[in-house]
Amino acid sequence: MEVGNRGKPSRHGERDDRRTRIILACIKVFSRTNYEKATTAMLAREAGVAEGTIYKYFPSKKELFLACCRYIEDQLLQRYRAVYREYRDQPLESLKRVGQSYLDFIRENPTMRKFLAFVLNNSYDEDFLRELEGFLTVNRMAVEEVIKEAQKRGELRETIDPKIGAWFFVGGYFTLILMAEMDEEAVNDPHFMDKYMAPMFS
Amino acid sequence: MEVGNRGKPSRHGERDDRRTRIILACIKVFSRTNYEKATTAMLAREAGVAEGTIYKYFPSKKELFLACCRYIEDQLLQRYRAVYREYRDQPLESLKRVGQSYLDFIRENPTMRKFLAFVLNNSYDEDFLRELEGFLTVNRMAVEEVIKEAQKRGELRETIDPKIGAWFFVGGYFTLILMAEMDEEAVNDPHFMDKYMAPMFS
DNA sequence: TTATAATGAGTGAGCACTCACTCACAACCG
DNA sequence: CGGTTGTGAGTGAGTGCTCACTCATTATAA
């Protein structure tokens, strides 16, 4: 129940902190069950607030869920952007690193992984689907550009169609989640990412 | 509402027919919405029977859903087995054909595709997850054997790890669904499957 | 007529969301 | 400084509705 406001009242950002705390708690709940089965009562309990409070921060359960999606997407996009920036002049390497970075993320955050797997599925709600499409498109376009660049520099076979290669790469995110869920051993092999990328790059 | 029994009462198999008709109708419904949102009332209406009747054929909504899963899995496995048999002595070609066969299936049956996409997601129900795992494992093992065989015959690079290659291949089913949903044009290209397989095989 | 199948109104549990109320605290006042 | 008042985040019992499943009744087949 969290007796509030030990320390200085930081006044500003106070509200945002709490919002984020609610989001993090709800990601846990959504990854344990699923959107429909996660009741607002459960969400509130995990966040340590009353049901009413949730509605002070989010207009509806759906919007709360989308806020959770966006939180994770932001985390991922930040990582990706950092990688692309660092390896700007080694396109092929940057792809491998992005893949590795994604794998690290889902291995280190099983909760987020379960949540993601869930998002990938619940695409039969219009709003959830839009969210997913947006995220995948951003990723695909970036990868497509990198593939073209890699081919221009002769680092990658010309037989690979950039657009389809990008789909392949991004669709692979789902494969990685499946593997992490169903075949942990394989994923923990330190050379896993090399082997995984072999069809594409070797 | 379907005024029943025009034609002879085939007496035997009559019951199975009706069961299958219910399954087919329910696949439609489940693919339009999702498991939770598909109400028993909707399922009954689409099947042209009363709610009570459904419970004469299936003990619960969940079992009905699993029956839908199994129906589609059977359809796919039948196709695959036929392909593997036909191309037994051309392992690499058989993989391409299986991929093509899957693609054809989801292109010809958008309903089943949506249903499948949904199954891939709702893996947070223990029973649904088991069903999915079973199906993927059967597929993966088959593909892994074929990859090994193809490598033995020198049709496929040795740099590809058979187990991971199989994961890649089977996980790709999901990518194909995503593409069919989000980028129909690409999928309709007559040379699509060649391009799609290029990373792996070329 | 009897046995079997089909029906759909009814039931009770569970859910998202609301709203009248509380109370810690800040701001102002004499 | 103590006292008064205003504020709004927080609360949780209550509300109206939806849904999976049942079962008494009706239709059909043998």
Image: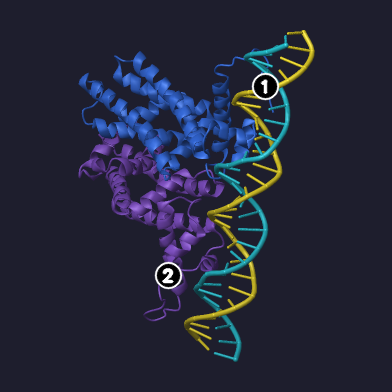
Chain colours: A blue, B purple, C cyan, D yellow
Q: Is residue A106 left or right of residue D10?
A: left
Whole-Å distance between the Cαs marked 2 and 1? 63 Å
Label 2 SS = helix
Residue matched to label 1: A4
Looking at the image, residue B157 sits to the left or right of residue A69; the answer is left
Q: Which mark is residue A158?
A: none
Badges 2 and 1, same chain: no
Residue A63: x %, y % from top left? 49, 36
Residue D5 vertical position relative to residue B191 in the rendered view, above or below:
above
Does residue A90 lie above or below B132 as drawn? Answer: above
**Residue A178: x %, y % from top left:** 46, 37
Relative to the observer, which residue lies in front, B62 or A49? A49
Q: Residue at x 53, y 58 (%)?
A: B61
Mark 2, residue position: B17
Provide residue A26's location: percent of width, then percent of height. 56, 33
Res A31 visible: yes
Which quadrant of the figure contains the N terminus of chain B? Answer: bottom left
Residue type pointed to by label 1: Gly
Of residues A8 and A94, which is closer to you in this image?
Answer: A8
Q: Is residue A162 left or right of residue B143?
A: left
Measured along the vertical axis of the image, is residue B164 above or below residue B51?
above
Residue A191 seen in the figure: no
Query: On what subunit does the disc labeled 1 rest?
Result: A
